[in-house]
Amino acid sequence: MHLPRSLWRAALLFALAWLAASGPARAADETLRVGSKRFTESYILAELLAQTAAPHTASPPVVRQGLGNTAIVYEALRSGAIDMYAEYTGTIALEILKGSPANTREAMNAALAPMGLGVAIPLGFNDGYALAVRAPDAERLGLRTLSDLAKHPELKLGLSNEFIGRADGWKGLADRYGFTQVPTGLDHGLAYDAVAAKQIDVIDIYTTDAKIDHLGLRVLEDDKKYFPRYDAVVLYKLDLPTRLPKAWAALQTLEGKVDEHAMIAMNARAELQSVPFDVIARDFLANTGKDAKAQPQEARRGFMAKLFGPDLWKLARQHLVLVALSVGIAILIGVPIAILVFPHVRLRAVVLGLASLLQTVPSLALLAVLISMLGAIGALPALIALTLYSLLPIMRNTVTGLAEVPNGLRLAGTALGMTPPQSLQLVLLPLALPTLLAGVRTATAIAIGTATIAAFIGAGGFGERIVTGLALNDRELLVAGALPAAALALLSEGIFELVEYLMRRRRRAPPSSLPPA
C-alpha cells in the first residue's frame, strides 16, 4: 500500500517528535515522584513532601499534581508511576483496604505489605468528612447534629461525586442516619459556590477546608460516630526508604509538624489569596512548622499574572506534543485501515461503527479504563485515548474522499495500465486528499479540546490550570487554562486554512508546458 509522500513525511516528523518527547522523560531510579489528589490540601502536601526531600535527592523531585480521586492516585502508586502521596487513615482503611480490620498503623502496614506499600509519617492533623449547612439555616431549623438533619428531608444535598461513591461515604451515612434525600453530585470546589448561592442547602466538607469559616457554614456533629478519623499520613512504596535513604530520613522530620490550624491557614492562602502551592509549602518549611497565619497577607494574583505565568510555555509544549502525536498516530492507523475496508461495504460499516462507538465513551471513563489496563498514568494513557478519539473523523473522511472520486477517473487509471496500488497512489489518494485533510482538521480540533482532560491523570497541558482552578474554585485560573487552549485551536484552524488555500491554488494553476519533442 502506498501513501502520498506528504503523509509519509508527516509520519516521520511525528515519530521524531515522539522520540524527542519520550526519550528523556524516563525518570531515573533516583528520582522521587510525589503525587496528589485533586483538592487544595493534597496539592499543598505534595509540595511539602517534595520540598522537604529535595535537598537530599540527586535530581529535583517530580510532583504529579491533581491526578484525580483515590482510585486513580492509588493505582498510580501501585504501578510505580509515583513513589508516595499524602493519604488519610480512614480512606486507607475503608477505601483501599475495603474495611478490613486495620485500626492502627501497624495493622494497616501488615495489610498493605503484600501490595508493596506502607504507611508512615503521621503529619499531625485529622481532616475528616462532615456535612455543613449555612449558619442562618442551622439557627432557623435547629440543626446541630446529623440526626437533626435527617428530620428535614426537604433540604437539598449537593455532595462531591467521590463522597457519593465512597465506601465510607453517602450510602453508609444515609443508612446510619436514615437520610431519604437524593443528593446531587458536584465538584467539591464548586459546591461552596452552590451553597453560598442557595442552590443547595447541605454539602460535604473536609474539616480543614478554609471556606467553612469564610462562608459562615455550620459543621453538623456526627452524633452517631459514623466517620472514622482521617489522620494525614504518607502512603509510599516499600522500596523507597532503601532506594532514597537520605530523602526518606528528611521526610521523617515532618512527623507531627502540621497541626489542624496550620493546615487550615495554608488552605486559606491557596483558596482565598491565590498563593501558589509551592510558595505556601516553602513558607511553611522556612518557618520550621510555625503557624501559617504568621505569613504576610499577599495581594491576590491578577488574571494576567495567571494567564502569562511561568508555566505557560511548559504547558503549551506538553499540550502540543499530546495533540501532534495523537493525531499523527491516528493518521498512520486510520488512513490505511480506511483504505483497506473501503472496497468492502459491510466491513467498512462495522469498522466505522466501532470508531463511532469510541466517540460515545466519556473521556474520564476511557482514561480510567486505560489506567487500569496499562498500570500507568500520565502521557501514555492520555495519548492512547486522544488517538482513539481522532480515528473516526480521519477514517470517515478518508472513506468519503475515496468514494467521491469519479468513476471516469478510476477507469482512466486502469486504461493507462496502472496497477491497483499505482492507481491508489497516483489517482485516488491525491483526489481524496482535500476531504482527508478536512478529517485531520476535525481530529486536531477534537484533540486540542480533549487534551485538557488529560491533566486529570498527570499528562500536563493547559488542563493543569483548569483542574487546579476547579480544585480552588478559581474562575480566573480556569479561564487562564481555557484561553490558551482556545488560542491553540484557532491557530490550528488558521494553519489548516492556509494549507487548503495553497492546495486550491495548486489545483487551479495551469499545467506546465510539455518539453519540446
Image (tube, rainbow, N blue to C red):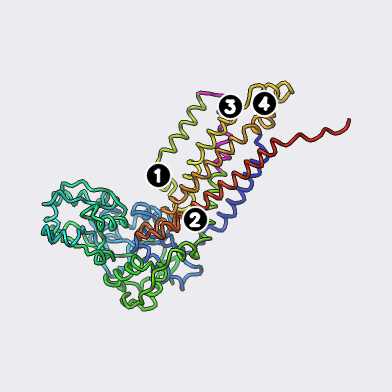
Q: Which residue is labeled 4 in the image?
A: 420
Q: Secondary structure at mark 2?
A: helix
Taking 466 as reference, is 383 left or right? Answer: right
x and y, in percent, of residue 487 in the image: 51, 53
Quadrant the N terminus occupies: top right
What's the magenta region? 329-345
Quadrant the C terminus occupies: top right
Q: Which residue is labeled 3 in the image?
A: 403
Name the front one of labels 1 and 2: 2
Q: Residue 31: within the magenta?
A: no
Asked if the residues shown at circle 3 and circle 1 are in contact, with their CB atoms under 8 angstroms apart, the answer is no
Q: Secondary structure at mark 4?
A: helix
Asked if the residues shown at circle 1 and circle 2 are in contact, with their CB atoms under 8 angstroms apart, the answer is no
Q: Residue at x 44, y 72 (%)?
A: 246
x and y, in percent, of residue 167 in the image: 25, 51
Position above or below: 503 against 284: above
Q: Residue 332: within the magenta?
A: yes
